[in-house]
Image (cartoon, helix red, strand yellow):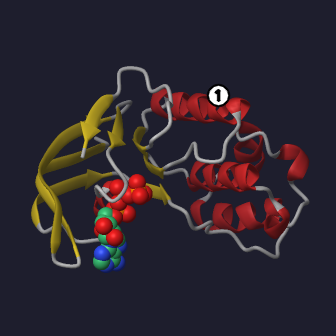
Amino acid sequence: MTHLVFDAVTGERGGRTLFEGVSFALAAGDALRVSGANGAGKSSLLRIAAGLLASAGGTVGVEGRVAITDERLALDRERPLVKAIAFWAGIDGGDVAFALAGTGLTDLAEVPVRLLSTGQRKRAALARVEVAGALIWLLDEPANGLDTAGVAMLEALIARHRARGGIAVVATHQPVALPDAQELVL
Ligand SMILES: Nc1ncnc2c1ncn2[C@@H]1O[C@H](COP(=O)(O)OP(=O)(O)OP(=O)(O)O)[C@@H](O)[C@H]1O
């Protein structure tokens, strides 16, 4: 069964302890909101969950494929958006049209990634996560740069992901509605 479990996890960066004793258990359909001051370690926690950074203590249990978004956009800047997303669909097998529609980007399909606005780039990052078909979404400040409609789109996307058995971990300073989410303050 899909799950993401932290048991007394310690996060360190550059020899400095950012957090310790962090525990939570997420199963299919669950969400976790991670908040905390700048530098508290939210991004580091997501990177530990993704297996990109080693924890300095405790155990992490992951069952299911993981997709992470951070400030970098893992899309080819020179390609039209639809082709850049399709590159990942080619690897991961997702539905490009569905991902673009779900993020409100259908009309921008032919625009090169480098010409997208800040909010459109944020939407494109979500389309890339959607197309990855992963069950565990790790979203780092996904609402930054999104307008009101964009935040509503994000909320709907996460709700749909959870309804089909996905897990969402959302590190955010913004008010993003995550019904029945667990809360973690670092
Ligand atoms: N590669 C690294 N080497 C050493 N220290 C790092 C490295 N990356 C991040 N840090 C430090 O780790 C701390 C936590 O960073 P992190 O990005 O996880 O925090 P955050 O809670 O996501 O912050 P923000 O709200 O500003 O995005 C910061 O003090 C940062 O300077």
Looking at the rendering, which quadrant does residue 15 occupy?
bottom left
Looking at the image, can residue 65 be seen? no
Point 81% across, 59% down: residue? 116
Of residue 36 and residue 34, the one placed in the foreground of this image is 36
To which residue does mark 1 refer? 152
- Is disc 1 placed on a helix, strand or loop? helix
Q: In the figure, residue 32 lies in which quadrant?
A: top left
Q: How many marks?
A: 1
| Above or below, comparing residue 16 to residue 140 in the picture | below
Task: Determine the image quadrant of residue 28.
Answer: top left
Q: Position of residue 109 (x, y in %)?
A: 86, 54
Residue 148 coordinates in the image, percent (x, y): 69, 30
Residue that protrudes farthest toward the front in the picture: 37
Expressed as whole percent of the image width and height from the top left, the position of residue 111 reads: 89, 61
Residue 59 percent across, percent down from the top left: 12, 58
Give the image quadrant in which the ligand numbered 1 is located: bottom left
Q: Is residue 130 left or right of residue 40?
A: right
Q: Label 1 amino acid?
A: Ala
* Local crowd size for mark 1, using a 10 Å CA cut-off: few (<14), some (14–19), many (≥20): some
Instruction: In this rendered view, identify the residue nearer to me: 55 or 143.
Output: 143
Q: Is residue 57 visible?
A: yes
Question: In this image, 66 relative to 23: left or right?
Answer: right
Q: Residue at x 68, y 69 (%)?
A: 75
The residue positioned farthest toward the top in the image shown: 180
Which residue is found at the position 50% from the left and 31% from the top? 176
Please report the residue visible at 82 percent of the width from the left and 72 percent of the height from the top. Answer: 79
